[in-house]
Amino acid sequence: MEIKFKNHIQYNIDFNRHLTKNSKFFRFREKFFICLPLIAIIFCAIIFQDSWHKTPLLTILIELGIGLIGVLIASKLFPWLSNKSARSYLSGMPEIAESINSTTTIILTDNEIIKKGISSQCKVPWSSIEHLIVEDEYIYIHARIECFQIPLVAFNSSKEKSDFIKYINKKISIYL
C-alpha cells in the first residue's frame, strides 16, 4: 500500500505541536501564558490596595472580571502565537525549505514502513511501531525511533483511509 502527499509548512507546524503538546515544558508555558492576565490583575490589586480601600468588593469583582476576560483572550491567543512563531522559525531555515514543499511517499510493506522524501528515506520495522493515533486532520504512527505524520487529505476516499488504518492495526497487533 502506498500513500503520496505534498508537504506544506502547516504540516510541519502541526507535527511539531503534536510532538510537544504533551511535554511538561510546553504545558507549563501554555498555562503560564494563559494565567498571566489573572496574575497581573492580582499583582496590581496588591500594589494599589490602599488607593481603592473604600469599595473593596466592587474592586475585587471588577479586577476578577478583567482577569477572566484576559484569560479567555490569552487562551485563544496562545495557539495562534505558537503557530505564528513556528511558521516564522521554519520559514527562516533555508536548509529545510526544499523539503517543505516536496512530495513524501509512505509505503507499507509486509516487513516495514518506508518513508521516502526528497532528502531521505527511512525504514521502520513493524516490530518497533508502538501505536497509531488518528486525529481530525492527521494520522500519526509512533515508533521507537520515528514518528510518521500522514495528512488525511492524502487519501482519495474514506475507504482508502479505513483500509490503511486497518492494515496498520493488523500489523501492530501481530507484534504487541
Image: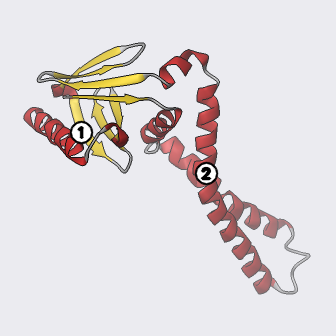
Q: Earlier in the sequence, mark 1 or mark 2?
A: 2
What amino acid type should be assigned to the residue bearing mark 2? Phe
User: Quadrant location of the N terminus?
Assistant: top left
> Residue 136, position in %: x, y?
37, 51
- Name the residue rendered at 62%, 29% in the picture: 89
Amino acid carrying label 1: it is: His
Q: Nearer the viewer, residue 48 or 85?
A: 85
Residue 37 lies, in percent from the top left, at 71, 61
**In-image side of 136 versus 33 (left or right):** left
Q: Is residue 148 left or right of residue 24?
A: left
**Frontmost residue, 62 versus 122:** 122
Observer-nearest of 117 and 61:
117
Horizontal side of 98 relative to 169 (left or right) equals: right
Residue 90 seen in the current view = yes
The answer to whether residue 110 is above or below residue 8 is above
Determine if residue 145 is in view. no
* Crowdedness near tag 1: few (<14), some (14–19) or many (≥20) residues, C-alpha within 10 Å: some
Q: Secondary structure at mark 1?
A: strand
Residue position marked by numbered label 2 in the rendering:
78
> Looking at the image, which residue sits at the far front?
156
User: Residue at 87% of width from left, 70% of height from top?
Assistant: 48
Which of the 4 image quarters holds residue 162? top left
- Name the residue that disc number 1 marks: 131
For label 2, the SS is helix
- Relative to the observer, which residue lies in front, 14 or 142? 14
